[in-house]
Image: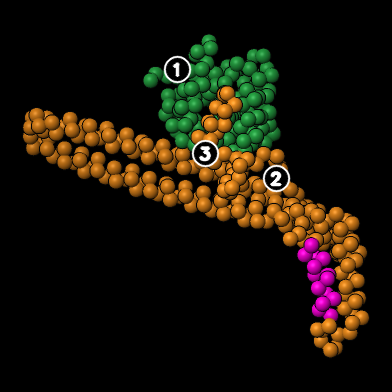
Chain colours: A orange, B green
Amino acid sequence: MSLSEQHNMKMDNQHALAPHAPAGASPEVFQQLGLITRQLHDTLSQLGVMPRLQEAANGLPDARSRLTYIAQKTGDAANKVLNLVDLAKAEHQSISAQTRAMAAAIVADPVKAVATGGVMNFVHDVEAATSRIDGHLTDIMMAQDFHDLTGQVVAKVVSLANELEDSLVKLLVQAAPADQTAKLMAHIAPVAHSVATSELSGPVVAPEGRTDVVANQGEVDDLLASLGF
Amino acid sequence: MSHPTDLKFLIVDDFSTMRRIVRGLLKEIGYNNAEEAEDGSVALRMLQNAKFDFVVSDINMPVMNGFELLSAVKADENLKHLPVLMVTAEARKEDIVRAAQDGAAGYIVKPFTKATLEEKVQKIMQKLAATA
């Protein structure tokens, strides 16, 4: 339901509420309040504040969805990095232990260490372990992509917050008594919005049920292939 | 597989983290020669002032976005031969189609893997070699 519809419903409800009013409140008071509220509503509508405020308010669920996406991405990245560090440290500890054992074997009997294939096995094991560690480090590097993806989403949320603030400031100025307007303007004038809006949509935070976006690289490749690229 | 490691890449992204990631991956794939630009405008100036062989570009950037950079590259007689691989979070089908129609050599959607980047770069390189 839009803000305007909610407002109209509230206006209608005033008539229903009137009969249940406390004995001390006269119907004239309710009628007067209703008139003032209607005047405020009409004035705001004429000033064009309400549609923008409504637009900003409608964006709040989207902002919540985007903030959830940020929490999810940062949480996933942190867990991924910690898990990979655990794996890399285990590999590292294994190499250290094998190195100490190999050093002891060479000190005890160098010929035997080579002849039994222990040295070559150790070399192969170290090579394989370092390769796995390198893979973990690459994955840790890739996990940092959350900065780019969440950064774009944060920019969208900041833009929405700016819109909401802008609408509320206009509402405040229009609703203020005449003698307070100049003082208010002096306080709110320094507010500047530096985040540029973009026609591009950024990361898809909720792909479920959407047919206008792709969910993964495979769908990108299929789409391009269908176009002959 | 051997790589022509002397090829020079230009990585264009407004997030330094992503530029470092792409640069690191290209290095792992075997391409050590890469420079970076933070938006399309800076990238275009760099392309006009030095020789590059391959462009890897984001789309959603301030000042000049990836689509504008792609159009500018393809409109420039001296640059239009350059392959431009889009690496972006923009997942709308209309954006993918637009990139292809505007002359992008490939399209990777973020988040991506090292294998995806390697596959796309190799595919573009093979296509270039076949048409050369």
Q: Residues within 10 Å of mark 3 (few under 14, many from 20)?
A: some
Disc number for residue A195: 2
- Vertically, is B124 above or below B19? above
Which image quadrant for residue A118? top left
Query: Are discs 2 and 3 located on one and the same chain?
Result: yes
Expressed as whole percent of the image width and height from the top left, the position of residue B49 reads: 63, 18
Q: Chain of mark 3?
A: A
- Vertically, is B4 above or below A80? above
Locate residue A119 relative to residue B14 in the image: left or right: left
Query: Are discs 1 and 2 located on one and the same chain?
Result: no
From the image, state whether disc 3 or disc 1 is nearer to you. Answer: 3
Which image quadrant for residue A177? bottom right
Residue at 81% in and 55% down: A51
Secondary structure under tag 2 reads loop
Q: Are marks 1 and 2 in contact (CB under 8 Å)?
A: no
Residue at 69% in and 53% down: A59
Residue at 33% in and 45% down: A87
Q: Residues within 10 Å of mark 1 (few under 14, many from 20)?
A: few
Q: Are marks 2 and 3 in contact (CB under 8 Å)?
A: no
Expressed as whole percent of the image width and height from the top left, the position of residue B52 reads: 56, 19
Residue for badge 3: A216
Residue for badge 1: B4
The kind of residue tagged 2 is: Val
Q: Nearer the viewer, residue A79 or B123?
A: B123
Residue at 90% in and 66% down: A39
Query: Quadrant location of the C terminus of chain A?
Result: top right
Query: What's drawn in magenta, residue-wise?
Result: A5-18
Q: Nearer the viewer, residue B111 or A81?
A: B111
Disc number for residue B16: none
From the image, state whether disc 2 or disc 3 is nearer to you. Answer: 3
